[in-house]
Image (spheres, helix red, strand yellow):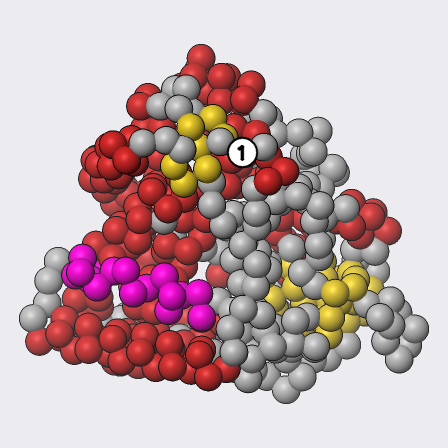
Amino acid sequence: MTRDDGEQLLDYPLPASGALEPPEEWQRLRQQCPVAGVRLPSGDEASLVTRHEDVKQVLSDQRFTRDLGASGGARVSANESGGVFNTSMASALPQSGAAHQRWRRMVSKWFTAKRMATLRPEIESMAERLLDEMVEKGRPADLKAALGFPLPVWVICDLLGVPEADRDRFAYWSDTLLNLTRYGQEEIDAAQNEFVEYMAGHVAAKRADPGDDLLSALTTETDSAGEGVSDEVLVATGQGLLVAGHETTANMIGKMVAMLLSDRRRWQQLLEDGSLVRTAVEEALRYDANPGFGMPRYIGEQAHLADTTLPEGTTVVCSMAAANRDESVFDNAEDMTLGRSPNPHLAFGVGAHSCLGQALARTELQTVLEVLLRRLPSLKLAVPVDELRRVDGLVVGGLREVPVRW
């Protein structure tokens, strides 16, 4: 497909030949077309950046905002709301400036590396319990369904004070919020109304009877300006953390294990040297060729990027995964090197909007990997790698299932 100016437009997201393989276009784009015109699932146009330097620049530059609802901003998905980046949840949270920093400071206190270290024993205990259940049911098993999904849901719901009986509902609500092409507008609206209604009730309950959890703390806290947090912001915070706190990590657990087992020499290397777990997790994050949509940004003024002039009102999609394969930054970028250090990958973004929960995600991934290596050293994929299937139609990337034996 071509634009009026004759530029060839690529349909985005780009297709890949396998569930764990990167799109062939990545390398060509980095080398020959670092700012490429793409057509999103909505039909709107955007500019795709794939080089490490350019992605880092866009994510660090405050002129590139998350305000896709601005004039000319691209809708990501085909439904009316335009996708998770255009929703009322996104608009309810302060997206930039001092208000965003105040909100971020209040929430980030719950996601420090020190606090995550105190959570690790509980995460390990839950991983052990889930593995016990998986082993008892027998092999083969779907590691994503048995461990990858329920563990992060349990952790984030615990942080938010969500009752265990309510947790099964979040998967569907999250999927509709993360829609690209899977759901229709009527289904999305119904699910999101349920999600907002549930979270509003949860926030009201926390205001009436605070517990020892993040949302309870936010109902009573004031920011540096002496202002409390509104119900609208609390509801959006709860929604955002529930979605971000379980969807990405649940999928990453499955992809990480699949990557390590797809060449079993990697698994054997970790069995022989457990000290590599930390760097192996970082390398899995870098090497992940199926992370999902990427990070869109909007710029309301003309800007220059990689010898390209971006017109006012351009939406830029940052492919952190493509940037993480940049040969100018990573030696042997197409190899998964478990001891790679330093590893300046961009999986969690960079700058003022880098992932709030990255310490939690790292803790969960490291703990899961340690428990699996100890409990199931004989673990292997139960199907050939080329039979693994990608999650389709959502903003997040993942595998539909991760069949394993032991």
Query: x, y (%) of residue 144?
Result: 41, 44
Could you tell me the amino acid type at mark 1? Val
Q: Which residue is mark 1?
A: 383
Can residue 165 be found in the magenta stretch? yes
Viewer can see residue 366: no
Viewer can see residue 167: yes
- Give the main secondary structure, helix, strand or loop, of the magenta stretch: helix
Residue drawn 21% across and 64% down? 166
> What segment is highlighted magenta in the picture?
160-176
**For mark 1, does the 10 Å Cα neighbourhood hold few (<14), some (14 to 19), or many (20 or more) residues?**
some
Give the quadrant of residue 132: top left
- Callout 1 secondary element: loop
Does 34 sit left or right of 277 as displayed?
A: right
Examine the rendered structure and indicate whether residue 23 appears above or below residue 305.
above
Give the quadrant of residue 70: bottom right
Can residue 145 be found in the magenta stretch? no
Number of numbered discs on residues: 1
